[in-house]
Amino acid sequence: MVDARLITVVGATGAQGSAVVRALVETGKYKIRGLTRDSSSEKAQTLKRLSDNIDMVTCDITKSDDVERAFKDSWAIFAVTDPWTNPNQLELEKQQGYIMADIVSRYHYKKCRNLKTIYVEPAMYMQNWRNAGKLPKLDDGTVILAASIDEKVELHLVDIDDIGPIVREILADPDKLVGQDICVCGDEITISKTLTEEEFRTITKQLPKTAQDNIFGMHKWIEEYGYYGKDKDWTKINKIKYI
């Protein structure tokens, strides 16, 4: 695959990144450079074994030199920020985003004046509920689902594994979507309607302090504005790929 296009995937061993890598491998069309904090880790090596066209690279996305080296010669870059490695996550994510955008704009400016970007916006992961830990049970067998959001608020959810095929479809013809926001989500649901056959009880969720304020703030935003805001057309994704 000497002439194959190189796609660099930031956070390749993470939830979104690994889904994208697996989906791109299925095409057999691309060279893939997966970025991770430790390319020798078990997760990184498992991905590398998927195909000879995958190269796993150690990269700290808070360091410009690392990012510049990792992004070199890329045809496309799937870029995500890492929000959970530092309690000061908001500022850290901004720093990561600024660094990646700056490096990409430098490379891209040599070829054309306008930076081509597509904003892929996944909804809340369905897996978040499964990975929240073992749900407590009362003596009568009732399962308690704890959440800091009103059970009647409409939520958007997405299976992490669906993100990869969406990104793959976008990259098959990216020019038609440049500059657009692509909401990756399923239909709107509510916790209360989803659990209509079970007893639902609203209780206070006690979270670790490092995550408590951010998750609570996110839930309050969703309650007031919806996941994607009031003005965004989240149904646009159906025009690209229906899963």
Image (cartoon, rainbow, N blue to C red):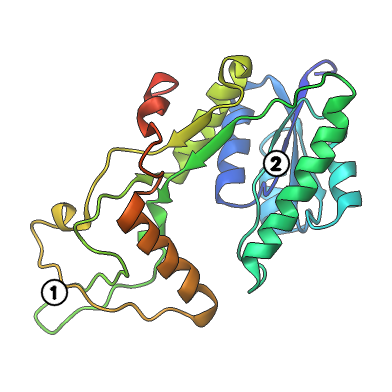
The residue carrying mark 2 is: 49
Percent coordinates x, y for residue 126 in the rendering = 37, 51
Percent coordinates x, y for residue 140 in the rendering = 9, 80
Give the number of callouts: 2
Q: Residue at x 13, y 74 (%)?
A: 142
Q: CA distance from mark 2 to mark 1?
A: 44 Å
Q: Residue at x 29, y 65 (%)?
A: 149
- Kindly indicate whether the residue at mark 1 contacts the one at mark 2 (C-beta within 8 angstroms): no
Q: Hey, what amino acid is under mark 1?
A: Thr
The residue carrying mark 1 is: 142
97 over 147 or under it: above or below: above
Left or right, residue 167 beside residue 77: left
Q: Nearer the viewer, residue 8 or 203?
A: 203
Dot 2, how many residues are within 10 Å of its Cα: few (below 14), some (14-19), or many (20+)? few
Dot 1, how many residues are within 10 Å of its Cα: few (below 14), some (14-19), or many (20+)? some
Q: Residue at x 13, y 84 (%)?
A: 139
Q: Secondary structure at mark 2?
A: loop
The quarter of the image holding the C terminus is top left
Q: Residue 34: name its quadrant.
A: top right
